[in-house]
Image: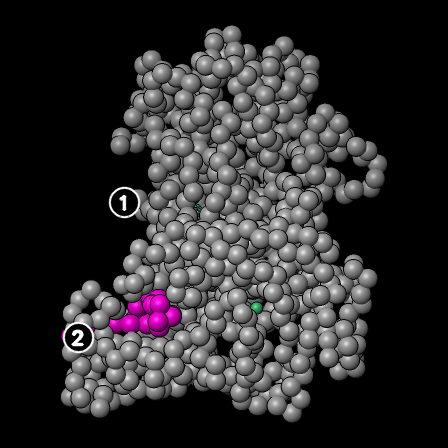
């Protein structure tokens, strides 16, 4: 891939992620003028929670976490049948440490998690401890027929710097002897795992508009220039996200871990932008109150730290009186006794396969929390009592089609390399919650 | 007249020239008539004859389980999308190739099902398009599901039609039916000669006047209509009008299939004027007054019955002569509208009558 074709720098970087490989990586090096600090020699201070990203991520003016903009998901199959052995564990841990030494743990540096599927844990005689709620993936709406992801593991790489994601990936594949000036171990993740799938994506102000040309059927001129997601609105406000504490497993050997659901949602942006108007988009994404009262400016940065969902009427009322319920309005019905959402969304857009889609990656203490949230979002109860359709005028269900679903356990850091199904003893997790 | 002659004349109508991608790609030139054809001036707030009636072609029908599925095509259409009583005009996009339509019914009773349909289209290169169709109403098709779809070109396509369970209630004979999703696969060949040569009828002087054309005769597909007045069960209480919808109200008493509880049952059967096309996706409620006091107030349950089709119902304790019934339309039928229906069934006034 030549970088001399006059592709604008940012545009180049995001397509580089989608393409991947060492060539894309070296091309990135020349284009991104960043100097990412290396990681420490001693990684012992790194948190047990692999998902503890928030403390090192930048925040916007309102204090909302800014999600890392470049992403890669590596779906991996363990090469060995039966239970993993210590050599393989060492190999995995060594490979992971290699990239952690190369890049500091930060938004501009590298954030990663390693997670394992129910299929992986079936290789053990003992089932997972009761503290871990990790069922096989299933369809979560009566009108969807997703395929299920059953590879053994998923590595999630994230950074605001494209070359970091690509470099880390290449090193994990054993393609780099040095990374960011740091010698890499002679241990590749791909010696232990085969690559089953590679998914990529982006999130952040302006990135969807820049990526619009890479996908079929995206009305490129309609995706707002500054929107962080294809559908045009800001997402992930502080008060509409579960905290990392809220999603952390509290007890047992996997304490400090979390569960992860990843779905691939196809987006119909033609309907969204060409067949709906702004009022409808606001009503369907947030709630009719927001649309009626012009609550949202542009992508919605003016909302501050929340989607202001308290201003919306109850879903059953707007359903009957306005014929529509909003996505945020419905989803906010899945909250706990402390009024906290149940899931921590770390989703991002994608043009994988040439189609606009969203990798909806969510963390929650139990997969059941995700299932409950998705049920609230389906709004089946609302459709039975109103003119709101199964999808039509039912939040954003009209515009998304679930293609794939997968469930994973993100174990605590000490167990991230091929964990056993029933590890001995408790992980030393100190949490602020007692439940 | 066919679509192409119409398109040539379209330039004269609107003066503008706009190259439309789908046809440009296929070697055709189209005018702005395609994108946003002329609308009749002074449309009444009622069902009216549009300027043109677009022909429709059948791709085929199939069954899956005890459900029938039909797939139909026409050239890309303008339509109006509805949220509450707010409508958005949807013009044809430059890369739209076809207006794809689907209907789903119970093969046993020939009842049209108001269940959302999604389609996934693929060819030998893999998936080319997937979309969730809009529930719609048009003069010659009545209630159907549809959307304008962009296809990469002429040729053969596989299509999977998928539905979820029926979201409304159902009466006794349908107990336990339509509770699960179902999908059906079909093939179709997109041939521009076939689709773009479909007949276009200009309605001339009639355009803009109240009325509508007959439903197209589709042999293999049940008509999306509800029963005539005389076919309604029980006693007809009232025939009302609201925003040009006809609203029939009947009362069944004694033993009936409409609810588990005893007592009279109020049936509300809204339909389009002229053709009796079903009007699902409404939210209705009823208030019952006796001697100046409200004695009952509640929502009508949207439901499906083999004889009544889509209707709205409510069980009552009793209904006496002299009682006043007031039906309020909280949400008008949430159906996307083709030309001829976009000004009707929107701001719907209540229907009120006294029981005789
Ligand atoms: C294309 C896909 C989606 C988009 C563009 C989207 C966008 C949004 C937006 C803009 C909000 C309100 C602002 C905020 O995030 O704070 C929101 C809230 C939310 N969404 Fe989504 N969303 C999508 C899919 C999903 C899915 C699949 C789920 C899973 C169930 C989900 C769950 C939630 C939850 C739990 C909230 C917060 C509710 C609360 O306040 O308690 N979203 N989403
Ligand atoms: Cu249609």
Expressed as whole percent of the image width and height from the top left, the position of residue A411 reads 42, 24
Number of other residues with Cα within 10 Å of mark 2, as a class: few under 14, some 14 to 19, many 20 or more: few
Please give the range of residues in magenta.
Answer: B300-317
Q: Is residue B338 left or right of residue A86?
A: right
Asked where in the image residue A313 lies, by quadrant, the reply is bottom left
Q: As displayed, is residue A392 above or below residue B33?
A: above
State which image quarter holds ligand 2. bottom right
Q: Which residue is mark 2?
A: B254
Q: As displayed, is residue B101 above or below residue B131?
A: below
User: Is the residue at mark 2 in contact range of ligand 2, meaning its CB lies under 8 Å from it?
Assistant: no
The subunit carrying tag 1 is A
Q: Residue at x 48, y 17 (%)?
A: A417
The quarter of the image holding the C terminus of chain A is top left
The quarter of the image holding the N terminus of chain A is top right
Q: Nearer the viewer, mark 2 or mark 1?
A: 2
Q: Which residue is mark 1?
A: A337
Expressed as whole percent of the image width and height from the top left, the position of residue B223 reads 48, 72
Q: Is most of the magenta stretch helix, strand or loop? A: strand
């Amino acid at each position: 891939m030549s970088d001399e074709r006059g592709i604008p720098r940012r545009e180049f970087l995001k397509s580089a992620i989608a393409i991947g490989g060492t060539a894309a990586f070296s091309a990135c090096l020349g284009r991104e003028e960043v100097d990412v600090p290396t990681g420490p020699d001693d990684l012992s201070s790194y948190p047990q929670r692999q998902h503890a990203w928030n403390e090192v991520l930048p925040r916007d003016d309102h204090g909302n976490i800014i999600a890392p903009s470049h992403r890669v998901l590596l779906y991996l199959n363990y090469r060995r049948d039966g239970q993993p052995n210590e050599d393989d564990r060492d190999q995995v841990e060594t490979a992971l440490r290699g990239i952690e030494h190369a890049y500091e743990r930060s938004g501009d540096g590298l954030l990663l998690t390693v997670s394992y599927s129910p299929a992986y844990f079936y290789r053990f005689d003992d089932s997972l401890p009761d503290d871990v709620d990790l069922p096989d993936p299933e369809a979560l709406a009566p009108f969807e027929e997703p395929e299920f992801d059953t590879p053994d593991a998923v590595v999630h790489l994230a950074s605001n710097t494209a070359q970091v994601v690509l470099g880390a990936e290449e090193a994990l594949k054993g393609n780099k002897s040095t990374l960011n000036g740091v010698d890499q171990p002679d241990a590749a993740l791909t010696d232990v795992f085969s690559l089953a799938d590679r998914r990529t994506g982006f999130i952040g102000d302006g990135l969807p508009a820049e990526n619009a040309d890479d996908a079929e059927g995206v009305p490129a001129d309609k995706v707002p220039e500054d929107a962080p997601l294809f559908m045009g609105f800001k997402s992930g406000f502080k008060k509409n996200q579960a905290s990392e504490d809220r999603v952390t497993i509290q007890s047992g050997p996997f304490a400090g871990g979390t569960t992860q659901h990843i779905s691939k949602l196809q987006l119909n942006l033609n309907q969204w932008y060409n067949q709906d108007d702004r009022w409808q988009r606001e009503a369907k994404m947030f709630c009719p109150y927001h649309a009626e009262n012009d609550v949202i400016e542009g992508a919605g940065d003016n909302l501050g730290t929340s989607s202001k969902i308290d201003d919306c009427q109850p879903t059953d009322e707007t359903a009957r009186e306005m014929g529509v319920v909003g996505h945020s309005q419905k989803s906010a019905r899945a909250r706990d006794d402390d009024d906290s959402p149940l899931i921590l969304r770390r989703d991002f857009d994608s043009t994988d396969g040439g189609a606009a889609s969203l990798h909806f990656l969510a963390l929650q203490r139990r997969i059941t929390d995700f299932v409950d949230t998705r049920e609230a979002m389906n709004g089946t109860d609302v459709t039975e009592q109103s003119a709101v359709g199964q999808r039509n005028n039912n939040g954003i269900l009209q515009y998304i089609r679930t293609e794939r679903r997968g469930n994973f356990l993100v174990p605590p850091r000490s167990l991230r390399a091929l964990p056993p199904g029933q590890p001995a003893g408790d992980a030393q997790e100190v949490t602020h919650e007692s439940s | 007249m066919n679509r192409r002659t119409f398109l040539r004349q379209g330039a004269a109508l609107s003066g503008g020239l706009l190259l439309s991608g789908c046809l440009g790609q296929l070697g055709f030139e189209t005018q702005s008539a395609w994108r946003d054809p002329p609308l009749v001036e002074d449309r009444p707030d009622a069902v009216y004859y549009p300027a043109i009636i677009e022909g429709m072609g059948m791709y085929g029908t199939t069954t899956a389980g005890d459900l029938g599925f039909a797939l139909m095509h026409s050239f890309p259409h303008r339509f109006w999308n509805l949220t509450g009583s707010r409508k958005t005009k949807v013009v044809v996009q430059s890369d739209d190739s076809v207006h794809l339509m689907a209907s789903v019914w119970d093969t046993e009773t020939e009842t049209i099902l108001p269940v959302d349909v999604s389609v996934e289209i693929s060819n030998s290169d893999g998936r080319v398009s997937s979309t969730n169709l809009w529930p719609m109403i048009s003069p010659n098709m009545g209630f159907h599901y549809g959307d304008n779809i962009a296809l990469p070109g002429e040729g053969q396509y596989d299509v999977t039609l998928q539905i979820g369970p029926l979201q409304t209630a159902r009466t006794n004979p349908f107990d336990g039916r339509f509770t699960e999703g179902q999908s059906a696969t079909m093939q179709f060949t997109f041939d521009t000669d076939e689709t773009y040569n479909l007949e276009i009828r200009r309605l001339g002087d009639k355009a803009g006047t109240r009325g509508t054309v007959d439903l197209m005769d589709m042999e293999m597909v049940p008509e999306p209509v509800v029963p005539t007045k005389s076919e309604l069960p029980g006693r007809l209480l009232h025939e009302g009008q609201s925003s040009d919808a006809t609203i029939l109200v009947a009362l069944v008493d004694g033993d009936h299939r409409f609810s588990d509880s005893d007592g009279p049952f109020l049936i509300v059967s809204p339909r389009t004027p002229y053709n009796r096309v079903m009007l699902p996706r409404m939210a209705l409620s009823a208030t019952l007054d006796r001697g100046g006091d409200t004695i009952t107030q509640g929502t009508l349950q949207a439901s499906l019955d083999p004889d009544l089709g889509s209707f709205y119902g409510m069980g009552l304790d009793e209904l006496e002569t002299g009682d006043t019934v007031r039906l309020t339309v909280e949400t008008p039928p949430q159906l996307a509208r083709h030309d001829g229906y976009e000004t009707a069934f929107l701001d719907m006034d209540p229907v009120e009558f006294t029981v005789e």
